[in-house]
Amino acid sequence: MLDIDLDATDIRILSELQRDGSLTNVELASRVNLSPSPCLARVKQLEKMGVISRKVTLLDARRLGLKVVVFISISLDKQRRETLDEFERRVGALPQVMECYLMSGDADYLLRVVVPDVEALERLIIDQITRIPGVSNIRSSFALKQVLYSTALPLG
């Protein structure tokens, strides 16, 4: 399942950090039944291996006024590498775009966007996305309710 060799202790460390990335090393060590020094060494090794890529603080979008979640399917008129690269570069610069996936199937890209209201979505689509070279079709689907949201990866 895993591309790298992790033991049960590494998995426990990763699971605890996924639940709460603000744990001190002493708290983490206690939760995974290690002393602090070997625990810190394991965390540093997991970082060095790229398993732990970064640590962030998760914000509540709704409390910050970002109440509208929209999934936008985008088709391009050409799927040449230059067109794809330019689209990805331009979309990557839009702070409202939380995720962007190159897709198989009907659309070329799927974006997850957060905005405060429908007017902001309209401005994003009309003023930004439609101006990206190669965009030929845009379809939006509004999320009515977030049923599940997780940042924790399944570790087995």
Image (tube, rainbow, N blue to C red):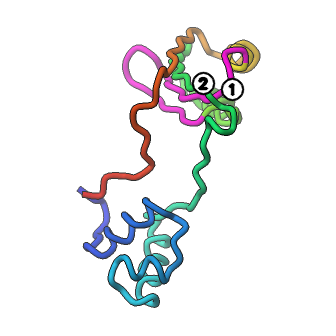
Residue bearing the label numbered 1: 116
User: Which mark, residue 49?
Assistant: none
User: Alpha-carbon neighbours of circle 1 within 10 Å: few (<14), some, or many (≥20)?
Assistant: some
Q: Amino acid at mark 2?
A: Val
Q: Residue at x 66, y 34 (%)?
A: 89
- In primary-sequence order, the first of circles 1 and 2 is 2
Q: Do we see residue 129 in this rendering?
A: no
Q: Amino acid at mark 1?
A: Pro
94, above or below 123, in the image:
below
Q: Which residues are magenta?
A: 98-119
Mark 1 near mark 2, Cβ–Cβ under 8 Å?
A: yes
Q: Is residue 121 left or right of residue 19?
A: right
The alpha-carbon separation of the residues under discs 1 and 2 comes to 6 Å
User: Alpha-carbon neighbours of circle 2 within 10 Å: few (<14), some, or many (≥20)?
Assistant: some
User: Which mark, residue 68?
Assistant: 2
- In terms of image quadrants, where is residue 98? top right
Q: Residue at x 28, y 69 (%)?
A: 5
- In terms of image quadrants, where is residue 38? bottom left
